[in-house]
Image: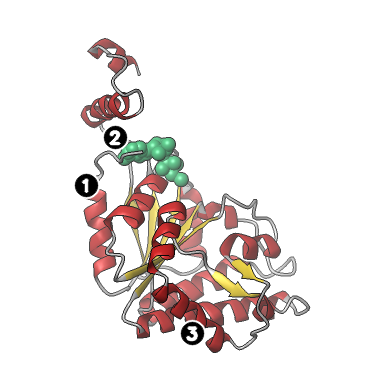
Amino acid sequence: MKFFNREKEIKEILSVIESEPQLIYFIYGPINSGKTALIREIIRNRLDKSKYIPFLIDFRQVSVGSFEDFIEAMFEVDYTTKIDDIKKYVKDFINWILENTDTVSKLISMYSGVPLQIPAPVLKLEEKEERRIKNIYRYLKELFIGIREKGKVPILVLDELQMLKDISLNGNRPLLKSFFQFLVALTKVEHLAHVFCVSSDSLFIEHVYSATDLEGRARYILVDDFEKKEALEFIDFLVKELLKGKIVLNSKEKEKI
Ligand SMILES: Nc1ncnc2c1ncn2[C@@H]1O[C@H](COP(=O)(O)OP(=O)(O)O)[C@@H](O)[C@H]1O
Ligand SMILES: [Mg+2]
């Protein structure tokens, strides 16, 4: 479907993307305000595909309750490989992305991002969760370093962030804190990747902000419901795009909607 307006927010997000990664950005606003649609529109249609490699994780797709669910939501685990050397796998994966631009373009159109592959051996299923999460961070860091070395900039979007609320490692140490420390390292410290966290749950965002020490390390971008004038224009847009103008609404009906 075609996308309506949001030029101000698109400009704001693109200007973040065009500068050096510095901060974690929280994209927030009421449920159904259009946060997901906006970020997907930017990735699909507004990004210079020769410069950026987007990865979009939708934590809603898998009901995230355990560490296993977290892995399943984040990654496409590559069970076909025997490679357990992170650097070697990363090199092959990046080369695949760079050499298959048509396929990658199609994947971006379909999924608003490149599937985030990880080799199964790196997850070492028999090991403790604490070790496995360290391997995951090491893998992502190497991947993003490799992408930067090829002159491209990775963008990591984490949609429906509030789904991570209850995940803990081995039932005690919460995953959230180490995950956000890692995201701070990616942005503020090493400037490797852009990170956008999307959620309607502002209480949860507040919790993350204070519990993981994000002061000076994160910023907010509001995607609010449309103002009245814009909302009325949006109805016209929907009538045209969805109903192909088959019905005509008078202004009273539009007001009611
Ligand atoms: N700017 C827009 N143009 C066209 N459709 C939109 C726009 N913003 C939102 N929508 C549509 O409205 C619905 C809700 O938007 P969504 O992005 O899922 O909201 P949120 O992620 O904020 O909860 C979706 O069907 C989406 O496609
Ligand atoms: Mg959404």
Does any atom of ligand 1 lie closer than 8 Å to the CB of label 2? no
Of residues 98 and 66, the one drawn nearer to the viewer in this rendering: 98
* Foreground of the two, 193 or 164: 193
Q: Going from the N terminus, do you reach mark 3 or mark 2 first? A: 3
From the viewer's perspective, is 238 left or right of 83?
Answer: left
Vertical arrangement, residue 198 with respect to residue 3, above or below: below
**Residue ID at (48%, 79%):** 143
The circle drawn on residue 91 is 3
What amino acid is labelled 3 in the image?
Lys
Q: Is residue 7 left or right of residue 95?
A: left
Q: Residues within 10 Å of mark 3 (few under 14, many from 20)?
A: some
Distance between mark 3 and mark 2 Cα atoms: 44 Å
Q: Residue at x 57, y 63 (%)?
A: 74
Q: What amino acid is at disc 1?
A: Glu
Badge nearest the viewer, 3 or 2: 3
Q: Which residue is mark 2?
A: 226
Residue 11 point in image, percent of width and height:
22, 55
What residue is rendered at 60% in x and 59% in y?
73
Q: Secondary structure at mark 1?
A: helix
Q: Give the residue type at disc 2.
A: Phe
Q: Name the one closer to the observer, 108 or 184.
A: 108
